[in-house]
Amino acid sequence: MKKETKCIQAGYTPANGEPRMIPIIQSTTFKYDTSEDMGKLFDLEAPGYFYTRLQNPTNDFVAAKLAALEGGTAAMLTSSGQAATFYSVFNLASAGDHVISSSTIYGGSYNLFNVTMRRMGIDFTFVDPDCSDEELEAAFKENTKCVFGETIANPALIVFDIERFAKAAHKHGVPLIIDNTFATPINCRPIEWGADIVTHSTTKYLDGHDATVGGAIIDSGNFDWMAHKDKFPGLTEPDESYHGITYAEKFGNGGAFITKATAQLMRDLGAIQSPMNAYFLNLGIESLAVRMQRHCENGLKVAEYLQTNENVAWVFYPGLPGNKYYDRAKKYMPDGTCGVISFGVKGGRKAAEEFMKHLKVAIIATHVADAHTCILHPASSTHRQMTDEELMAAGVAPDLVRLSVGIENVDDIIEDLKQALEKTGA
Ligand SMILES: *Cc1c(COP(=O)(O)O)cnc(C)c1O
């Protein structure tokens, strides 16, 4: 199946007389005839459902669709993108271990790594995604357990060189985890470039309609855990909380990572997605291919327009010819990047504030990456307590506006930006 068909048909094949649509199994528990039957499930000796915190059929159908779209062997849904990021790393690294991450990642991921997971005893080294080979090499330590990056960084929009980082990670015997939220599997499939694990905040384009918060983890099945036995004891040595099962032996490279994340992390930490939300997520994924195409078309037209507007100081969009990441974007995302653009309003902070007041189509929101065009001026909202100097130091220019181009008629979006830019007094 091609990706457009997978969006609609993968993951769930109804049998004769069964519902065409993925059913919402809104049930916490599942019934068994004998306790022996249920015992086999608890021991991971037979597949099946017993309690929704661990697994639910609705979630599994949607996860299977995402695995098909990303080209992976197994997947799981989580209650949020944050939970997916946390589980993907914590499934490999524990206290005393070390992780390498790109320095340009989503702010929530950065905080999770640099503050919360450090408190759990895990060490992080943040590397510039465009660092030299020497710098990247120097970041690896004896206790490094994985490398983490984002296909298109939110909000910096820097395109990550997946192939290069995958080679470096594999050379050191560790997997590469890629947060593919902004590109989605429609525009980029990191596994094809060597990534081992893919994560998503499904809250963004995958859901696509501002409806549900959620996350997902997809395993490529390509990483050979047993070949690096000493590095990953959690996968290659018996789990006493599961009667001595060794995940990599029992479930192989294709199933070990997700089975462990489900059996241990979901069991103990419980960030499960509700079946109802999984149903909504699936509705979003069904139209993902057509939506992404429109997001990219609109995004490019808006970026091109902004470049010609005399009240705009600069435009940053990796899909725009001349952008620093254009060539890399073309390599990894030949069909388009995403709908998120950043640009500067001439006249700085004050002019940008004025511009925001006159918008009618673009909605002011901290959210990005869904059907509605949304816009944010960090200097007058999320970062308003900071001075211009502090903003520059944080890499957020005072005139910077982050625009997430939706799938409305692009002429309406451009007209709205045009009339608001005319009133900035530049
Ligand atoms: C939003 C986002 C997250 C966090 O996802 P939530 O669903 O909000 O928890 C992680 N990574 C990226 C790239 C995001 O944009």
Image (tube, rainbow, N blue to C red):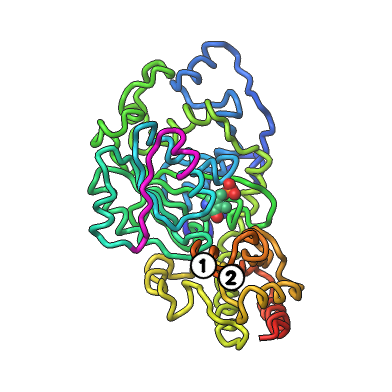
The answer to which image quadrant residue 26 occupies is top right
Image point (36%, 48%), residue name: 125
Task: Pick whichever of labels 1 and 2 is earlier in the sequence.
Answer: 1
As helix, strand or loop, the secondary structure at mark 2 comes to loop
Residue at the spot of label 2: 398
* Above or below: residue 382 compared with residue 99: below
As helix, strand or loop, the secondary structure at mark 1 comes to helix
CA gap, disc 1 to disc 2? 7 Å
Residue 119 visible at all = yes
Q: Position of residue 320 (x, y in %)?
A: 48, 77
Q: Position of residue 111 (x, y in %)?
A: 51, 47
* Above or below: residue 288 compared with residue 420: above
Q: Is residue 152 in the magenta section? A: no
Image marks 1 and 2: residues in contact by CB distance under 8 Å? yes
Image point (58%, 54%), residue name: 206
Q: Nearer the viewer, residue 132 or 54?
A: 132
Query: Magenta residues, as a range?
Result: 114-130
The answer to which image quadrant residue 29 occupies is top right
Q: Position of residue 335 (x, y in %)?
A: 47, 70
Q: Give the amino acid at mark 1.
A: Met
Residue at the spot of label 1: 392
* Above or below: residue 297 compared with residue 131: below
Image point (41%, 71%), residue name: 325
* Above or below: residue 120 compared with residue 380: above
